[in-house]
Image (cartoon, helix red, strand yellow):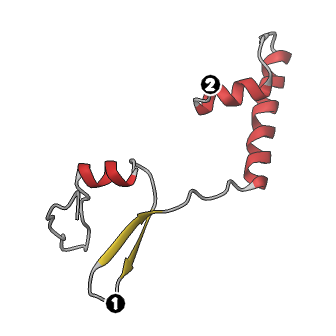
Amino acid sequence: MGNTKATTVTVKGQVTLPKSVREAAGIRPGDRVVARALPTGGVLVERSAPAEPDPAALAAARKRIEDAVAELYRRGVKFEMTTDELMAMTRGED
């Protein structure tokens, strides 16, 4: 099997996935993984599908940003950017 490398289990049951394994599986820092015991005694570790964003949380975040921008306008600060553009910029979207 490709990308195999031994690692040690800590007292807390934690394992560091070798870089070559993380890269092959597309696992990046902050990603969630699922570990499953196999009937053969092995373990399968897979990258978990990203969670769907909570619509209520997104709406609340959008409202906070809109309120903050409105307050800045009231104080005389002007922007040449829409809320959507501001949110995309803060998320690092192109």
Residue appearing at x 26%, y 58% in the figure: 17
In whole angstroms, how far apart are the C-alphas of marks 2 and 1?
45 Å
Is 24 on the left or on the right of 74, as rendered?
Answer: left
Q: Earlier in the sequence, mark 2 or mark 1?
A: 1
Q: Name the residue under label 1.
A: 39
Most foreground residue, 91 or 12? 91
Indicate the position of residue 12 as horizontal and vertical percent values: 24, 73
Q: What residue type is labelled 1?
A: Pro
Residue appearing at x 77%, y 39% in the figure: 62
Indicate the position of residue 25 as horizontal and vertical percent values: 37, 55
Is 49 on the left or on the right of 68, as rendered?
Answer: left
The quadrant the C terminus occupies is top right
Q: Is mark 1 on a helix, strand or loop?
A: loop
Most foreground residue, 86 or 50? 50
Most foreground residue, 62 or 5? 5
Neighbour tally class for label 1: few under 14, some 14-19, many 20 plus, Cα within 10 Å? few
Residue appearing at x 81%, y 31% in the figure: 66
Neighbour tally class for label 2: few under 14, some 14-19, many 20 plus, Cα within 10 Å? few
Above-or-below relation of 73 to 2: above
Label 2 or label 1, whichever lies nearer to me, is 1
Above-or-below relation of 19 to 9: above
The quadrant the N terminus occupies is bottom left
Residue appearing at x 40%, y 50% in the figure: 26
Above-or-below relation of 47 to 62: below
Most foreground residue, 62 or 74? 62
Q: Which amino acid does label 2 sit on?
A: Asp
Q: Name the residue under label 2.
A: 94
